[in-house]
Amino acid sequence: MLSRRDFVRLIGLGGATALAVACGPGAPPAGNPTAAPAAQKPAAAAPTQGPAAAAPTSAPAAASGNLPQVVLDPAKAPKKFAEAPILADLVKAGKLPPVEQRLPEQPLVLQPTNETGKYGGNWRMAFTGPADKQNMERHNHDHLIYWDAKVEKLVPNVAGGWDIQDGGKTIVFKLRKGMKWSDGEPFTADDIMFWYEDLYQNEDLNPSKASFMEINGKQGTVEKIDDYNVAFKFDAPYQMLLDQVASLSVAGHMTEGWHAMGLWAPKHYMKQFHPRYADKNTIEAQARAAGFDNWANYFKDRNDVSRNVDCPTTAPWHFTSPVTQPQAVMERNPYYFGVDTDGNQLPYIDKITWTLAENLEVANLRAIAGEYDLQVRHMDIAKLPAFKENESKANFTVGFWKWPHGTDAGFFVNQDFDGDAEIAKWLTNKDFRIALSLGMDRDQLNEVFWLGQGDPGGPAPAEDTLYNAGPGSRKLHSTLDPKQANDILDKLGLVKGPNGVRQRTDGQGDLVLSVTTVGAAFVNWTGIAEMVAQHWLKNIGIKANVQEVERSLMTRQLNANQLQIRVWSNDGSDNPFTYPFHDMAFSQDSGIGPDTGKYYESGGKLG
């Protein structure tokens, strides 16, 4: 269990509620499933929560309490299959094999949320630029294994199952025989071994080794048993590897291929960019021509399905227009390995189109006008009155989804900051951070930015989650108390000047903090930070300047240890063991310690 002091590192705000906007029925065109002949081999169920069907659970329809279920009983697996009309037309034209030949022998089987879907349609959404590619990945998780819809147990996904052997020292993942990449090529153990031997162990591609591949300070190994069985071996029992593999910290090729991670890569396609399989001088020349300084960065770009539409995927949809364009487009993967309980190959929806929105305001105005079919990310709860006013006119519904992670607007205090010795001294001082937290008026923030719908408090996850730090942890140091805050700062020796601003102890004038935010974000972080800066100045005499930057610039500044305080959510922190990036200085992307994260990632070589 995490101690209460662990949460003081991140000064959080409440409001952990997401706004979901979904168009009413009848918006997209739909088609009935096209039946295919009975499969040659009965499909024994081997399932996980397929992202294709999981996304709609954020829509108001999920309020029924139904959730998509993974079917694990082979007796309930469908014996014949159907496909989308647009794929059936390609089959008739001889441009695509029959659906039985495109599916693995034992496909993933998913019980639909409420009813069997209809094929067709274009799911319209918003995105804010190339740095927002996670927007697309959330509907396309291709993890080896995954969590069920209630996040209570592990279920198969890309892998049809797993075995725990040798007392937990060996985990064998069982792949699906006959499964294929989106280009129709076989997906086998060789694709995992290609990742392990040629990407993960290559020092140019991965100079730092991942912590999930390590137990008791020693890296594990990966071995091919046969074409459809791969063993992850460790010197000590490591059954938590399964939780890691199911989580976003490991994920799959769709999410992590861009930096040569993700547990597998399409060997048949990517080997042309790897010096073990092709001439290095030729690859280096190609890299320079494409604007990259070395072959490794070029390789990572080619392995990024969001930028390289020619790179095959195992996800439900594949990119046909990259994330670098004003419209990013994904179309159905004709070889996707999942079906519903009626045997209809998933996904139901033909295409997803993300249209670039320059900022949060544009995205929300378009949503209010009914231009999106289902959108959660980037929807601003402060616009709720406008959404409700236009709900019937624009034929959409508005719903809420309460997040368990703790905060939608966390102030991540960088304890590695070394750009100013005076500032660094205070950022690393626990009492100073407590004073900052006590100087915030979270109730006012909740009323202004969450319309009173949030739950003001610190960043501790919801009390009904497994890793909540105990009763009262969300209120610890997180209720406005200017007297206590000022007493703390006075005892620290931070005196106020004639202007009411606390002075630096090195005689260099006002103590001024820097808070960095991004625009076109999920909530109005800049507005929130500016109000908090007003709270600090009024309540405790601490001055703060707020700077809004573009998201990719913030990431570069964060990785370079240039930020003092960064505003972000702590999503995923309801389970810090599978997603530790916000709670712990786990990587160079840590808001509380990027250099410490580098040190941890590199085994002491960096940071």
Image (spheres, rainbow, N blue to C red):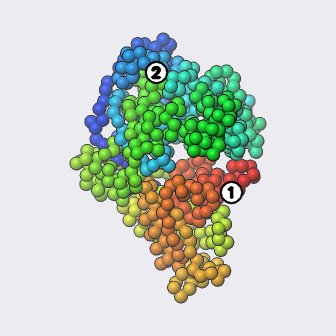
Amino acid tagged 1: Thr
- Front residue of 443/599: it is 599
Residue located at (58% from left, 69% from top): 434
Type of amino acid under label 2: Lys
Q: CA distance from mark 2 to mark 1?
A: 50 Å
Residue 511: quadrant of the picture: bottom right
Q: Residue at x 53, y 88 (%)?
A: 498
Question: Of discs 2 and 1, which sits in the foreground?
Answer: 1
Percent position of residue 299, x then y:
61, 38
Looking at the image, residue 408 lies above or below residue 375 = below
Q: Residues within 10 Å of mark 2 (few under 14, many from 20)?
A: some
**What residue does disc 2 label?**
76
Query: Which residue position is annotated with label 1?
Result: 596
Q: Which secondary structure, mark 2?
A: helix
- Vertical position of residue 549 compared to residue 213: above or below: below
Picture residue at 54% right of the left edge, 58% below the top: 554
Of residues 379 and 110, the one nearer the viewer is 379
- Where does residue 288 sit, x and y in percent of width and height? 61, 42
User: Counting residues from the N terminus, which is met first, the one under dot 2 or under dot 1?
Assistant: 2
Q: Compared with residue 96, is residue 346 higher up or lower down, i.e. above or below?
A: below
Circles 2, 1 touching at the beta carbon (< 8 Å)? no
Q: Is residue 165 visible?
A: no
Query: Which type of secondary structure does the marked residue at label 1 adopt?
Result: helix
- Classify 186 as above or below 520: above
Residue 443 picture quarter: bottom left
Pinpoint residue 370: horizontal percent, then vertical percent. Answer: 29, 46
In the image, farthest residue toward the bottom: 498
Q: In the picture, which quadrant includes the C terminus?
A: bottom right
Q: Is residue 169 left or right of residue 148?
A: right
Q: Residues within 10 Å of mark 1 (few under 14, many from 20)?
A: many
Q: Does the image show residue 309?
A: yes
Residue depicted at x 37% and y 48%: 20
